């Protein structure tokens, strides 16, 4: 049996610091397995998605500024797995703080962002 590997389409970064990866649907797949590497380390499985129509995954643990994350996805059908997708890469950065003047002082508010 042959299943094609999913193709990553994009990674979105939210102001909360979470990353969301999107990939294409693979015909005949039962679902997907998502893997993540942090700062070039080994890939580790972080999710198994059992619905073949679900082609996104939101990673809620990507909050450290300066860390690089790489994602790969595999399709599966029963016990058979496709090859790995190409990696989808993202590096988290905190934006420059915004300065707001207040009557009793100055407040700094860091805003997490990412550069793809």
Image (cartoon, rainbow, N blue to C red):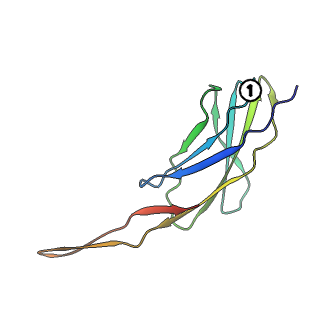
Residue depicted at x 60% and y 42%: 22
* Residue at mark 1: 27
Figure check: 5 above or below 86: above
Q: Residue furthest right?
A: 1
Figure check: 68 above or below 61: below
Residue 37 percent location from the top left of the image: 68, 54
Label 1 Cα crowd, 10 Å radius (few <14 / some 14-19 / many 20+): few
Residue depicted at x 72% and y 51%: 43
Q: Residue furthest bottom?
A: 105
> In the picture, which quadrant includes the C terminus?
bottom right
Q: Nearer the viewer, residue 20 or 9?
A: 9
> In the picture, which quadrant includes the N terminus?
top right
Residue depicted at x 71% and y 62%: 40
Residue 107 percent location from the top left of the image: 24, 72
Residue 75 location, quadrant: top right
Q: Residue furthest left?
A: 103
Q: Is residue 64 left or right of residue 1?
A: left
Q: Is residue 18 left or right of residue 31?
A: left
Q: Is residue 76 left or right of residue 58?
A: right
Q: Look at the numbered disc 1 and give the secondary structure of its residue.
A: loop
């Amino acid at each position: 049996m042959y299943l094609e590997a999913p193709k990553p389409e994009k990674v979105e970064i939210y102001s909360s610091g979470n990353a969301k990866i999107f990939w294409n649907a693979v015909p005949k797949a039962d679902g997907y397995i998502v893997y993540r590497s942090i700062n070039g380390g080994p890939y580790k499985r972080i999710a198994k998605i059992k619905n073949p129509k679900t082609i996104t995954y939101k990673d809620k643990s990507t909050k450290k500024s300066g860390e690089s994350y790489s994602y790969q996805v595999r399709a599966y059908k029963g016990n058979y797995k496709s090859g790995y997708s190409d990696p989808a890469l993202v590096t988290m950065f905190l934006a420059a703080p915004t300065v707001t003047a207040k009557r009793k002082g100055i407040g700094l508010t860091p805003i997490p962002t990412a550069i793809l």
